[in-house]
Image (cartoon, rainbow, N blue to C red):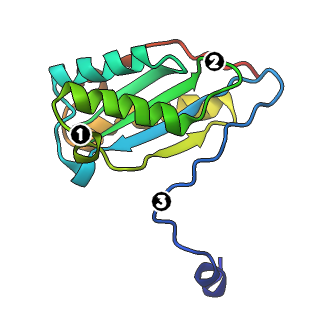
Amino acid sequence: MSDQESAARPNRKRPIHQPVVESGNRAIVVFVTVCTKHRIPVLAAPGMQQSILRAWSSAGHWLVGRYVILPDHIHLFCAPGVFPPSPLLNWVRYWKSMVAKSTGRGAGSLWEKNFWDTQLRQSDSYSAKWEYVRNNPVRHGLVARSQDWPYQGELNLLRWHD
């Protein structure tokens, strides 16, 4: 990309949340990253993990598949739990609010206002993204082997149908 093309593109400071796209009977899987406000490292703790898992389980409009909870952010894969899919933005706001309330904080004091999301287009994207995500604790120097990180798992099996 030329300097002129770069200059013509606006810098995005906030993510754009595109509506999910249905394509035949292909699965809808979305990769989401949510950060704490000012990247405060409070998420990687047993009580916090339980609060997050309870919130995800009670917010059934979207189903969480694999996830990794790091001290200051969460990576997760999710798929619609209802059809037509409800807005992802509403679901994320709901569970962020539930988690914040369970810790005695307001959602605005625990979480960044926004989040990042990307709809996966191919089954190999899910596998490749998962490999990257599950190795995040190793890259951050939190554990030597990804399987030793206690704040990860899979709540629902998200099947990919090509």
Where 136 falls versus 84 (above or below)?
below
Q: Nearer the viewer, residue 41 or 4?
A: 41
Report x, y in % for residue 28: 66, 27
Where 51 falls versus 16 (above or below)?
above
Residue 2, picture quadrant: bottom right
* 152 relative to 89 in the view: left or right: left
Residue indicated by mark 1: 106
Q: Secondary structure at mark 1?
A: loop
Report x, y in % for residue 13: 45, 65
Mark 3 or mark 2, earlier in chain: 3
Q: How many marks?
A: 3
Query: Residue placed at 28% from the left, 46% from the top?
Result: 108
* 75 relative to 31 in the view: left or right: left
Query: Residue placed at 52% from the left, 39% from the top?
Result: 89
Report x, y in % for residue 71: 21, 38
Residue indicated by mark 3: 14
Residue type, numbered disc 1: Gly
Q: CA distance from mark 2 to mark 1?
A: 28 Å
Q: Residues within 10 Å of mark 1 (few under 14, many from 20)?
A: some
Residue indicated by mark 2: 82
